[in-house]
Amino acid sequence: MKEKTGEEKGREIQEARVSYEILKPSTMLSPVPVALVSCADPENPARRNLLTIAWAGTINSDPPMLSISVRKSRYSHDLIQRSGEFVVNLTDERLARAADFCGVRSGQDLDKAAETGLTYIPAQGLDIAPAVEGAPVCISCKVREVKELGSHDLFLAEVVAVTVRADLLDAQGGLHLERARLVAYNHGLYQRLGETLGFFGWSVARPEALQRRMAAYQPENSYELKSARFLARDALTAAIHPGDMVVDATMGNGHDTAFLCDLVGPAGRVYAFDIQEQAVAQTRQRLQALDLIDRAKLFVLGHEHLAEQVSEPVAAVVFNLGWLPGGDHGVTTHWETTRTAIQAALSLLKPMGVVVICAYPGHPEGDRERRELTSFLSGLSNRRYNVLHQSFLNATAGAPECFVIQNQR
Ligand SMILES: Cc1cc2nc3c(=O)[nH]c(=O)nc-3n(C[C@H](O)[C@H](O)[C@H](O)COP(=O)(O)O)c2cc1C
Ligand SMILES: C[S@@+](CC[C@H](N)C(=O)[O-])C[C@H]1O[C@@H](n2cnc3c(N)ncnc32)[C@H](O)[C@@H]1O
C-alpha cells in the first residue's frame, strides 16, 4: 500500500471522531518533575547554588541512573561540569515557591538559599554538592557522561545515595512518598498531586487485593471534615512561606510556636506572646529541643501589646484562646485584650496574610469571647477582609470553632 503523505495524515487526524489541532513540534511531555538541584564549586565548596530542573528523567535501574538537561548558559552548568556532582531534591508544596525562585534567578547574581530561606546540609555520598534541608527526598548523583544535544547538555549521572525524610517512612521502614505532597510541573504550572487512582498493576489485580490495597490510600486522599485546630493549621500552612514574619499571640505550651517556626524556616521569624512565665519557659524548652529557638522571639507579655513590639508586615497571626493546657484554668484570655490584639494583628497583615483564631466556647469566658468575636468579625469590611467561621452544627456543646480572616490587599 502506498505510504500516506504528511498532509494526508494531518487531514485524517483532523477528521477523526475526537477533534484535534496540530501544533508545531516542541517538548510537550507532561507532567514533569520539579527538581530542585543543588551543586557547588569544587574550587570553593562554600560557593553553593540551586537551580530548578524540569527536564530530568530516570534512565537506568542497575546501576541506578538519572539525567538532567542543563543549558550551557546556566551558572550551575559550570559548577556541575567541574565538580561532577549534584543533588536532586524533590519539591513538595512547601518548597514549590522557592523552586520557582531558583528557576528564574541566577546564582551568578545572588545567593538563592539566603533569598529563599533554604539551608544546605551535607549530601550523603558526595564531597562537594550539598543537599537541601527539609526536602522530602535528596538524590545524590555523580556525573558519568555529558552529551551535548544542542540547546541543552544532558548530564547522565549515577545515583550514589538516596536520603529520605524520616516522617515518610513507616514503622517497617516502608517509604510513603504519597504523603510527601510532591509537586508536578504541567505546561508552565506547578500543580499538587491529587488522589490515588491505582497502584502498579491495579488494572490486573484481583478484586480483593484491589480493595485491600486501595483502602490503605484512602485516609490520605479522602476529604475529611476535621476539627478547628486542623483547619487552623491548614490555613497557616497555605499562608506562610519560608522567610515570613509571623506571630503566635497565645504561646501556651509552644506547640503552635514550633509549628510556625518550622513553616517560616531559618530566614523567618516568629514573635510569640504569653502572660505566663510557665508557658514561655515551656515553649523555650520545646524550641531548644527542636533546634528552632533561633527562629523565635518570646515575650512574657500580653498580646494586647502586639503593636508596641511588632511593626513589620506579617504573614499570619495565630490565636489559640482559653487557658494553658495543664496550667491554671483561672488564667484565660479575655475578650477585651483579645480584641485589642486582633485589631493590631489585622493592621499588621501583609496582602493575603491571615489571622487564625481557635475559640473554645466550653467555659463562660470562652463563650463570651466567641460571641463577641463573631459579632466583631461580622462587622469587618468585606472589601478588605474575607472572614471564615467554621463550626460543627451537630458537635457536642463547647466544641472549638475556627475563624480565619484574610487580608485581601
Ligand atoms: C519550573 C522550571 C523548570 C526549569 N527547567 C530547566 C531545565 O530543565 N533545564 C535548564 O537548563 N533550565 C531549567 N530552568 C531554568 C533554570 O532553572 C534557570 O535558568 C535558573 O535561573 C538557572 O540558575 P543558575 O544560573 O543559578 O544556574 C527551569 C526553570 C523553571 C522555573
Ligand atoms: C490555649 S493556650 C495556647 C496553647 C498554645 N497555642 C499551644 O500550642 O500550646 C492559651 C494561652 O493564652 C495565654 N494568654 C492568656 N491571656 C493572654 C494575653 N493577654 N496575651 C497572651 N497570652 C495570653 C494563656 O496563658 C495560655 O497559655
Image (spheres, rainbow, N blue to C red):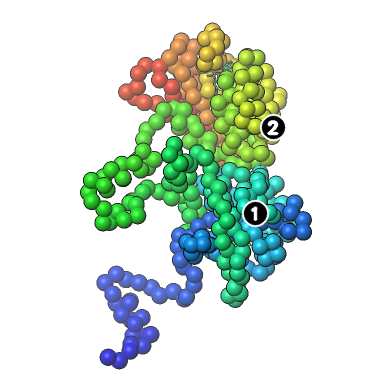
Seen from this angle, which residue lies furthest top? 330
Quadrant assignment, res 82: bottom right
**Between discs 2 and 1, the one toward the N terminus:** 1
Q: Is residue 7 above or below residue 54?
A: below
Q: Is residue 130 above or below residue 293?
A: below
Seen from this angle, which residue lies furthest bottom? 2
141 or 102, which is in the foreground? 141
Seen from this angle, which residue lies furthest right? 43
Image coordinates for residue 235, horizontal then vertical, percent: 50, 35
Image coordinates for residue 285, horizontal then vertical, percent: 64, 23
Q: Amino acid at mark 2?
A: Asp
- Dot 2 crowding, Cα within 10 Å, few <14, some 14–19, many 20+: some
Quadrant assignment, res 1: bottom left
Query: Which residue appears at 53% of the width and 23% of the height?
Result: 320
340 or 282, which is in the foreground? 282
The residue tagged 2 is: 294
Left or right position of 5 against 33 = left
- In the rendered image, which quarter contains the C terminus? top right
377 or 253, which is in the foreground? 253
Q: Is the CB of the residue bearing disc 1 within 8 angstroms of ligand 1?
A: no
Q: Secondary structure at mark 1?
A: loop
The residue tagged 1 is: 126
Q: Amino acid at mark 1?
A: Leu
Image coordinates for residue 190, horizontal then vertical, percent: 50, 54
